[in-house]
Amino acid sequence: MVTNKKDKQFDAVKMMREIREKISADTQNMTFEELKVYIKKKLADNNSKLVGQ
């Protein structure tokens, strides 16, 4: 069996890890209340909705 390896133009796993690392660095040492404010601000900036709302 021969497999052809294609170059990826977009690596979703790599992108998700980078995003997770940035969020972890931004929220490190935040209290729960600070974390809630951070999340609400990010959602407002992106015009996103919470799941289920």
Image (cartoon, rainbow, N blue to C red):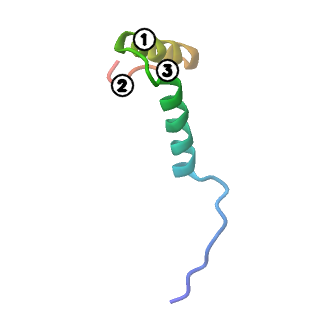
Q: Residue at x 49, y 18 (%)?
A: 43
Q: Are marks 1 and 2 in contact (CB under 8 Å)?
A: no
Image quarter for residue 45? top right
User: Is residue 32 depicted above or below 6 in this figure?
Assistant: above
The three-letter amino acid code for the residue at tag 3 is: Ser
Q: Check disc 1 and report its element: helix, strand or loop.
A: helix
Residue 5 x, y percent position in the rendering: 61, 74
Pointer 2 residue: 51
| Pick the front one: 51 or 17 | 17
| Pick the front one: 53 or 25 | 25
Residue 46 x, y percent position in the rendering: 56, 20
Q: Residue at x 55, y 33 (%)?
A: 22
Mark number displayed over residue 48: 3
Q: Check disc 3 and report its element: helix, strand or loop.
A: loop
Mark 1 or mark 2: whose residue is earlier in sequence: 1
User: Is residue 2 depicted above or below 38 in this figure?
Assistant: below
Residue 52 placement, left or right of 47: left
Question: CA gap, disc 2 to disc 3?
Answer: 9 Å
Q: Residue at x 35, y 15 (%)?
A: 32
Number of residues whose C-alpha sits closer than 10 Å to that of mark 3, classed few (under 14), some (14–19) or many (20 or more): few
The residue mark sitting in front, 1 or 2, is 1
Mark 3 or mark 1: whose residue is earlier in sequence: 1
Q: Check disc 2 and report its element: helix, strand or loop.
A: loop
Mark number displayed over residue 34: 1
